[in-house]
Image (tube, rainbow, N blue to C red):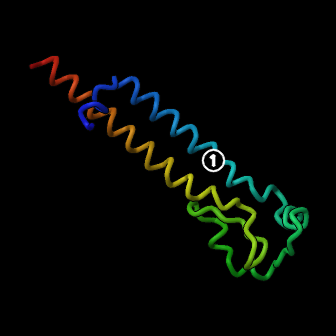
Amino acid sequence: MGETLLRIRPSGWLSLTMLSAFLLVMVFFQGLSAGGLDVAEACELSGHLYDHEYRSQQAHEQLQMFPLTTKCNAEYDLVPPWINPVLAVLALLTVACFVAMLAALIRRESLLRG
């Protein structure tokens, strides 16, 4: 099966790499914007209490790049639960497609020289 996958042209792998990277960026910004500009208002609109004390104690979590989180309180996160697993899968897919593109390029060059 690995041989069959390498038969895809490098340009095909590049297209798949770019598509997965694009989707990765889109999902990342979806997760970043989950709380909007005013988290307290977003929490109220979602029907959950905003706990300022909890958020100030957990400020380091709110600033990290992965996993994304925008918590209203200890029980509720404004970032949908599907965002972080999809980010992980898309990041792995992007790297895998890029490696496959490099392998296809190397194979193509070796066939042209040999």
Count of marks placed on residues: 1
- In the image, is 48 to the left or to the right of 8? right
1 lies above or below 37: above
- Image-quadrant location for residue 10: top left
Q: Which residue is mark 1?
A: 27
- Examine the rendered structure and indicate whether residue 101 appears above or below residue 111: below
- Residue at 78% x, 59% y is 35
Query: In the rendered view, does 89 fall on the left or right side of 32?
Result: left
Q: Sort mark 1 into few (<14), some (14-19) or many (20+) by Cα contacts within 10 Å.
A: some
Q: Amino acid at mark 1?
A: Val
Q: Residue at x 28, y 30 (%)?
A: 4
Quadrant of the image occupied by residue 68 = bottom right
Q: Position of residue 64 (x, y in %)?
A: 59, 64
Q: At which x and y percent is residue 84?
A: 59, 58
Q: Quadrant of the N terminus?
A: top left
Quadrant housing residue 109: top left
Q: Position of residue 34 (x, y in %)?
A: 75, 56
Regarding mark 1 in the picture, which secondary structure is present there?
Answer: helix
Q: Is residue 97 left or right of residue 2?
A: right
Position of 105 relative to 41 (above/below): above
Residue at 85% in and 66% down: 43
Specify whether 39 is left or right of 3. right
> At x 22% / y 23%, what residue is drawn?
108
Residue furthest left as drawn: 114
- x, y percent for residue 62: 67, 68
**Residue reaching furthest to the front:** 1
Q: Of all residues shown, which one is farthest toward the top? A: 112
Of the 4 image quadrants, the one containing the C terminus is top left
